[in-house]
Image (cartoon, grey):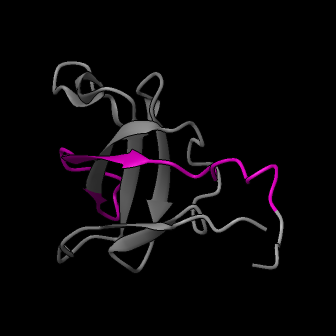
Amino acid sequence: MSLIRKRRIWWEAVSGVSSYVVYAGTSQNDFDPGTFSWETTPGVVFKVVFGKNEIIIPDEWPEFPAEERTYYIGITSRDDAGNQSDPFVSSGLFKFNPPPRPQKGGIESL
């Protein structure tokens, strides 16, 4: 089994919210106020998070895209009525595939 480094996405807790929604997109434009439409934004995946202000990738979000690239992460606060804030947006390189193993090697006496 390969060693895959996990990523922790965290945010500052907000009082009076029932959950948070974490979004992942491939372009900063995905989160433009004129086009961002929360859980229905084309090409953006999301995960609802209850009772905490962090998520460990890939353990707690196995559906997170596996393609190596920079992802833009948007985080919104959601209240009991389903209202959501504008997203806080950050970005980072995500890579969950190991490099290939060496194909040849050996042990020699010197």
Q: Is residue 82 one of those drawn in magenta?
A: yes
| Location of residue 22 with respect to 25 vertically, above or below | below
Q: Residue shown at 45%/72% (left/top)?
A: 50
Vertical side of 35 occupied by 72: above or below: below
- The rendered magenta stretch, by its main secondary structure, is classed as loop
Q: Is residue 69 above or below residue 5?
A: above
Q: Which residue is at the front of the view, 57 or 97? A: 97
69 vs 79: above or below: above
Q: Quadrant of residue 39?
A: top left
Horizontally, is 65 left or right of 73 in the view? right
Asked whether 90 or 43 is in front, the reply is: 90
Locate residue 108, reporting x and y percent: 82, 73
Residue 59 is inside the magenta segment: no
Magenta residue span: 77-105
Residue 76 horizontal/vertical position (percent): 27, 53
Q: Residue furthest front?
A: 110
Residue 107 position within the rendered picture, expressed as x and y whole percent measured from the top left = 82, 72
Q: Quadrant of the N terminus?
A: bottom right
- Judge left or right: residue 19 versus residue 47: left
Q: Residue drawn at (37%, 72%), measured in percent from left and top?
A: 54
Q: What is the tally of numbered marks visible in this picture?
A: 0
Q: Residue at x 51, y 38 (%)?
A: 68
- Return the x and y of residue 32 as percentages of the image width and height: 18, 25
**Quadrant location of the C terminus?**
bottom right
In this rendering, position of residue 49 left or right of residue 36: right
User: Between 67 and 2, which is closer to the camera in this rendering?
Assistant: 2
Residue located 52% across and 66% down the image: 5
